[in-house]
Amino acid sequence: MNLKKILWPETCPFCGKVCADGICGECRKRVDSLQIKEPTCMKCGKPVSASEQEYCHDCAHTHYYYEKGMAMWLHKEPVSTSVYQFKYHNQRFYGKLYAAEIAAEKGAQILRWRPEIIIPVPLHSKRKRKRGYNQAEILSCELGKILEIPVCRKLVKRIRYTEPQKKLGNRMRKRNLEKAFAVTHSMEGVKSVLVVDDIYTTGSTIDAVAKELRKAGVSKVYFLTISIGQGY
């Protein structure tokens, strides 16, 4: 038996119980019920109420620079607590499990977008030093390994320290991110990239990154997140 597994047994990322299979049976049922199902918004992938509804309320009234995107789960319990632990409490190994789940369920769609590279939403250096890691970077690298897509961790930088988005309303979220990101190299001729983050709420952060990538020459920007808010 692997000594490492005895000393550090695998635990379910949704309840914390020891589980050799990654997700325990009880949590498997709960998270499977939170998987995004059709009908969904054609832009952000949030659930919508009827199949004839093309866009959620936000996307119907907002211009976005990204092409389209999707998430694995709705941002509800137990997913929301799991992502919080991954993001703020050093549960970095959750990233490998999230990536495996996403690749199994969403991998075919991601490959249809033909992204040439994966770009994690960057943290400001001050925040990354404090936290010790960037959760979007961990997820990107694990997903890139499975789907065999290169990950560019330093192509987009966060050049301005900003207030946490969760503290702000929709309008202030966009203002908070103005000139927050910069692309370090020309992207002329790059047809498609995939931007990866942990949570999609209003889309302000991902779209701020997408805007800079489009300005740098990328033709189409897609996004992927672990979880997403409820649509309309």
Image (spheres, rainbow, N blue to C red):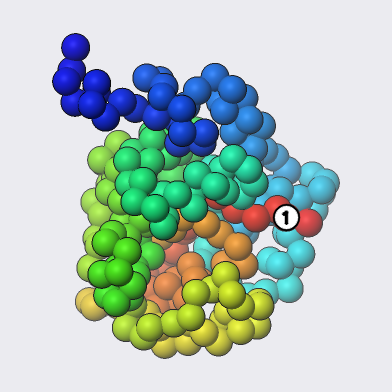
Q: Is residue 131 above or below residue 83?
A: below
The answer to whether 115 is drawn above or below residue 202 in the figure is above
Determine if residue 5 is in view: yes
Residue 43: where, in percent of width, then height? 62, 59
- Whether 202 is drawn above or below 1: the answer is below
Q: Quadrant of residue 168?
A: bottom right
Residue 38: image x %, image y %?
Answer: 70, 40
Looking at this view, is 138 or 68 the one in front? Answer: 138
Quarter of the figure that contains the N terminus: top left
Side of 40 relative to 101 (left or right)? right
Q: Quadrant of residue 68?
A: bottom right
Element assignment for label 1:
loop
Residue designated by label 1: 231
Tell me if I can see residue 42 in this picture: no
Residue 148 x, y percent position in the rendering: 26, 41
Residue 119, quarter of picture: bottom left
| Residue that appears at 52% across and 63% down | 67
Q: Is residue 222 left or right of residue 230?
A: left
Q: Residue shown at 82%/48% (left/top)? A: 49
- Total label count? 1
Label 1 neighbour load within 10 Å: few <14, some 14-19, many 20+: some
In this orientation, which residue lies closer to the viewer: 49 or 110? 49
Q: Quadrant of the C terminus?
A: bottom right
Along the viewing direction, whichever of 77 and 96 lies nearer the viewer: 77
